[in-house]
Amino acid sequence: MDDLDRRIINQLQGGFPVSARPYRDAARKLDTSESELITRIRCMLDDGLLTRFGPLFHAERMGGALSLCALKVPQARFDEVVGKVNSFPEVAHNYQREHEMNMWFVLATETPQQLDEAIQNIERCTGLEVYNFPKQTEYYVGLNLQV
């Protein structure tokens, strides 16, 4: 990772222009070109340096649903189940925890009904019960990881 990659990661965590050419506008602030910015983001995603680059939407305000879910995954099946769970487009995040419920993930769907469907599909696919923890209160964390 060079200085420009670091600046891209650090600057774009705090906002991305909303304009007709957002990559061009973001590139100007980074003293680079639009094509260089797009190429570098694509390379960091391909290399696994970034796992995701995109907006975060308030799904519920758009008619969708979000929920934190957990699974109790036998350790011997963990990698297999990770692959299955991550294959669902509704899975936004997936984390391993040192707990009886050792896999936690966020589901994001376009409608509340799709949330239940996604949970049922994950249960069928993995053979494991999904523990659903719907949001009761929202807190703004403002996580920004400088590199």
Image (cartoon, rainbow, N blue to C red):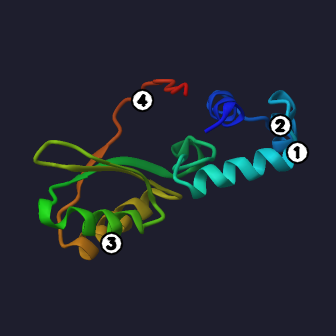
Q: Is residue 108 left or right of residue 100?
A: right
Horizontal relation, residue 49 to residue 67: left or right: right
CB within 8 Å, label 1 to label 2 = no
Q: Which residue is mark 3?
A: 121
Residue at the spot 76% in from the left edge and 50% down from the top edge = 38
Give the residue type at disc 2.
Answer: Ala
> For mark 4, what is the residue?
138
Q: Residue at x 51, y 24 (%)?
A: 142
Labels 1, 4: front one: 1
- Residue occupied by mark 2: 27
Q: Is residue 53 left or right of residue 19?
A: left
**Distance from Cα at disc 3 to Cα at disc 2:** 41 Å
Looking at the picture, tell me which residue is in the foreground, 118 or 100.
Answer: 100
Residue at image point 34% right, 67% down: 83
Tell me the element at label 3. Answer: helix
Element type at mark 2 = helix
The percent position of residue 50, horizontal first and vertical second, equals: 55, 46
The quadrant in which residue 98 appears is: top left
